Amino acid sequence: MVLRFREECFQEMHAAISAEEDPADVNRVLAGDVQAFEGIVRRWQGPLVNMAWRYCRDRGRAEEMAQEAFLRAWRGLAGWRRESSFSTWLFALAANVFRSELQRFPTVNVSLEEAAEPAGPATQHEGLARKQSDETVRRAVLALPTRYREPVVLYYFHEMDVAAAARTMGLPEGTVKARLARGRDLLRKRFPHLNEQSTPPLSSTPRPKKEVLQ
Amino acid sequence: MKPNVNLETDRDANDVIDRILEAEGELIPSSGFLAATMERVRDEAAIPKPIPFPWLRALPGIVLAVAVLGWCGFELARVVLANARENSFAQVHLTAATGRALEPAEWVVLALAASMLSWFFARRLAGRSGLL
């Protein structure tokens, strides 16, 4: 609990520093200082690689896609109107890049119906079975139809913040909520065993939700 | 048949989905990611910006081309309409024969003039932009 609190404090502090540093670095880049872009890459490489990873679940490809997103950001830096925060602009741009990259070269996915059934509790090591089962559910997200997949990916990437996911997708919150509910509905139907797992393990207590979705 | 809807169970399942999808491990970018990205950015920055098309300089040529094309279109429409109005095969044959007789000198001169003009404009534009 204390760890979580510290982590959140750190994140808030990081966000505040970044909010000051990003515009300054952008100004320097626009004035011709290429090196200033390094600060932006350094601060945002983690979030962008993680976001790309959630889109494709392939580490190498995630880094390639994140790199492409940074390049596009570099080219279009003058297009940041400063009406929204730099992170909002960057995430929206990255989501566009990832979407079009995956349209050009789709990930090799099985359909939702063909997604492997998670190992049952009878497996010898319960912890390992739970881990495998969780990973299967995460991979199944990629098998969701595109219109439901992206809201699910972005909602959890933004730590269950519908508004942030909606801003990144450039869609109204209501649309994102509806698609998210449909996406989760599909996952629930595909994995009926989730209904029986209502007691989460102690090690992974869910964070308090910013918004309760049905 | 309508499936049995159990809101309580669905909510529990949603909680499980939340737990699974939110508790994703953090991926740390590889050590060379920053350097590789900056290298690509520097490469991109080193490429000279594309030369913008000199619209102002090209404007006279564009206007001339549009005027010539418009005139040709107008003349063609005029001849076709005149032929259609008179609706005479003899006239059409006569027009074609007359045209054939008059064509060479005028059109050759016009084509040469157009070629010279375009060559002159192309050289002028290339010379000013430092390509020649």
Image: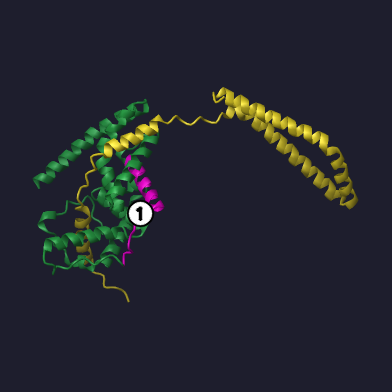
Chain colours: A green, B yellow
Q: Is residue A188 above or below residue B101?
A: below
Q: Is residue A162 visible?
A: no
Compared with B113, A51 (above or below) is below
Question: Which sits in the foreground, B15 or A62?
Answer: A62
Q: Residue furthest front?
A: B132
Left or right of B32 on screen, residue A71: right
Which quadrant of the figure has residue B128? Answer: top right
Query: Whole-percent x and y of residue A78?
Result: 39, 32
Q: Which residue is mark 1?
A: A175
- Residue at position x 74%, y 34% from top? B111
Note whether residue A179 is visible.
yes
Q: Residue furthest bottom?
A: B1
Say which residue appears at 19% left-offset and 53% top-offset: B23
Closer to us: A107 or A189: A107
Name the magenta segment's main secondary structure: helix
Label 1: how many residues lie within 10 Å, few (<14), some (14-19) or many (20+)?
few
Q: Nearer the viewer, residue A27 or A63?
A: A63
Query: In this rendering, is residue A131 above or below B69?
Result: below
Q: Is residue A2 left or right of residue A110?
A: left
Looking at the rendering, the stretch of residues picked out in magenta corresponds to A90-113
Identify which residue is drawn at 32% across, 63% down: A110
- Tally the numbered discs: 1
Q: Is residue A10 left or right of residue B124?
A: left
Does the segment drawn in magenta span residue A108?
Answer: yes
Q: Quadrant of residue A14?
A: top left
The amino acid type of the residue labelled 1 equals: Thr
- Residue A214 lies, in percent from the top left, at 26, 59
Name the spot of residue B20 as percent of width and height, x first. Answer: 20, 57
Q: Is label 1 in a helix, a strand or a loop?
A: helix
Please, is residue A127 above or below residue B26 in the view?
Answer: below
Magenta residue check for A88: no
Q: At which x and y percent is residue A198?
A: 16, 63
